[in-house]
Amino acid sequence: MYVLDLPFMIASYLTILPTPRDHFNRLRCLICPIPGVAFWMFMFIGKPNEKWLYFGAPTAVIYLVIFFFFLPRDGVTQPSKPIAFFMNLTSSVSSCCWMYMLIQFLVDLLNTVGLVFNIESSYLGFTVLAVGNALPDALNTIALSKAGQAIMAISGAYNGQLFGLLIGFSAATIKNYI
């Protein structure tokens, strides 16, 4: 299993910066913008084309300049708070890209199961995908209610679905126009 997981571990190590300030590594911060920005461009734009040069190259150069000039030098083991915030923001975008890629893989896997067992994709969406999407929200709502945060649980239950609908549909629409 480790052999199968090794390529993903290396790719995630090169594209996601460590977020805890005590795991700071200057060399990793200087290496990460190149594969990280390339991964972002692949996820947002698709296969390499001229848009990679227009958006990817300046983004990678900006990241390298920020990290090269503003990261702490010798003897300092933690970055300043603005740089730590920038590193967290970078890690969040990379993590969202990884989640998007893995979700695409799971949806393709679900479609394959539907083809093998001759089940329509709409039925799989109504059952398996709906349960997989709603179960973490339901468990979160239950945990909040048990902790005495009923108002937060109710608002989270409604707003989580609304957020998913608004962001999901708008992101899909934007991706179709890019």
Image (cartoon, grey):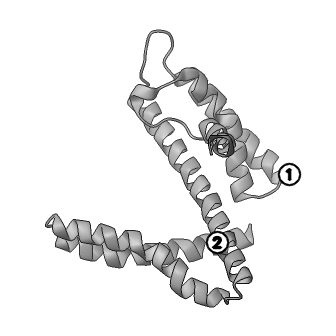
Residue positioned 46% across, 78% down in the render: 131
Q: Which residue is mark 2?
A: 107
> Residue 100, image x and y in percent?
61, 61
> Number of labelled discs?
2
Observer able to see residue 80: no
The secondary structure type at the circle numbered 1 is helix
Q: Which mark is residue 164?
A: none
Q: Nearer the viewer, residue 67 or 5?
A: 5
- Residue beneath the point at 66% across and 40% down: 6
Mark 1 packing: few (<14 Cα in 10 Å), some, or many (20+)?
few
| Three-letter amino acid code at the position of disc 2 | Val
Determine the image quadrant of residue 113: bottom right
Quadrant for the C terminus, please: bottom right
Q: Earlier in the sequence, mark 1 or mark 2?
A: 1
- As helix, strand or loop, the secondary structure at mark 2 comes to helix
Residue 129 in the figure: left or right of residue 62 = left
Question: Percent position (x, y) of residue 172?
Answer: 64, 73
Q: Position of residue 85 (x, y in %)?
A: 43, 38
- Furthest-top residue in view? 75
State the residue at coordinates (65%, 44%): 8
Residue situated furthest left in the rendering: 148
Residue on which disc 1 sits: 50
Question: In front of the other: label 1 or label 2?
Answer: 2
Q: Residue at x 66, y 28 (%)?
A: 31
Mark 1: which amino acid? Glu
x%, y% of residue 112? 72, 75
Spatial separation of the CA atoms under disc 1 and disc 2:
29 Å
As drawn, 44 above or below 134: above
Pick whichever, 155 or 55, lies toward us: 155
Relative to 112, residue 67 above or below: above
